[in-house]
Image: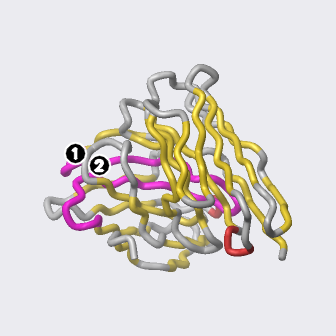
């Protein structure tokens, strides 16, 4: 157990819908990173939050947004869903705002868009 | 660019053989190079990392080497076992170490 909690584990939804993925970082970690992993693909960086503020952005679509709340949990919102958004979404956390130490990953949320 | 190139994409070895996976990065300012292992359907987990002030680091059957001049780093697994079968990702920080850019992954299959 990494200490990073993601909910839900599985999500099936229809095209055009909106979903929210939730991530609670390890206790004491201030930074949350979101990654997308499509089938047989690598990990694509989406966005990073540190202590409530957006720190870095990757190839995140405009239909996607995220935020980090005062209690440090983070939510990734995916709207106007398309079939191609089906993927495993991971969040990871680190203590600092930099990924120069071990990043702890959650178990992921598997999103299936039908 | 932002890419971390990783080779090979798949690697099949017999149990007991060695396996080597290589990565190339582009940002000369990068100074931290982790390797993550992801078993099927599971989360990525750190197995070893190296910082730019050393050229090699070992942990039992796993070692990582770094060539900063050539911007290469490699993962070496000796005496492979079937439980080593997984996808291995290298990574390097980008943008002031505010994100980790991952390689495309190497699927390692160790046959008994």
- The one nearer the camera, B30 or A48, is B30
Mark 2 closeness class: few <14, some 14–19, many ≥20 residues within 10 Å: many
**Front residue of this view, candidates A35 and B44:** B44
Residue B41 belongs to magenta span: no
Q: Position of residue B35 (x, y in %)?
A: 55, 51
Q: Which of the pair A70/B5 is nearer the observer?
A: B5
Residue B80 x/y as whole percent: 73, 65
Does B110 sit left or right of B55 as displayed? Answer: right
Tell me the magenta residue range.
Answer: A25-53
Q: Which residue is the site of mark 2?
A: A49
Image coordinates of residue B95 in percent, x first then y, are 40, 30
Tell me the subunit letter for badge 1: A
Residue at (38, 71) in percent of width and height: A2
Q: Residue at x 46, y 51 (%)?
A: A63
Pick the quarter of the image with the N terminus of chain A. bottom left
* Distance in Å between CA atoms under marks 1 and 2: 5 Å
Whether residue A37 is visible to the viewer of this picture, yes or no, is: yes
Tell me whether the residue at label 1 lies in contact with that at label 2, contact meaning CB atoms closer than 8 angstroms.
Answer: yes
Q: Which residue sits furthest left? A: A70
């Amino acid at each position: 157990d990494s200490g990073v909690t993601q909910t839900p584990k599985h999500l099936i939804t229809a095209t055009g819908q909106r979903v929210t993925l939730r991530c609670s970082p390890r206790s004491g970690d201030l930074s949350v990173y979101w990654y997308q992993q499509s089938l047989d693909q690598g990990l694509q960086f989406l966005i990073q939050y540190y202590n409530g503020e957006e720190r870095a952005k990757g190839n995140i679509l405009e239909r996607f947004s995220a935020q980090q709340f005062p209690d440090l949990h983070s939510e990734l919102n995916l709207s106007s869903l398309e079939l191609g958004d089906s993927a495993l979404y991971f969040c990871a956390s680190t203590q600092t705002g930099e990924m120069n130490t071990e990043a702890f990953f959650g178990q992921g949320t598997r999103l299936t868009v039908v | 660019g932002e890419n971390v190139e990783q080779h090979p994409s798949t690697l099949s070895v017999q149990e007991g053989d060695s396996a080597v996976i290589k990565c190339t990065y582009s940002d000369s300012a990068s100074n931290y190079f982790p390797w993550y292992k992801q078993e099927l359907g599971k989360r990525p987990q750190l197995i070893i990392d190296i910082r730019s002030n050393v050229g090699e680091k070992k942990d039992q059957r796993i070692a990582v080497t770094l060539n900063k001049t050539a911007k290469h780093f490699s993962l070496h697994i000796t005496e492979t076992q079937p439980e080593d079968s997984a996808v291995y990702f290298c990574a390097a920080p980008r943008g002031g170490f505010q994100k980790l850019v991952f390689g495309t992954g190497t699927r390692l299959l160790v046959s008994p």
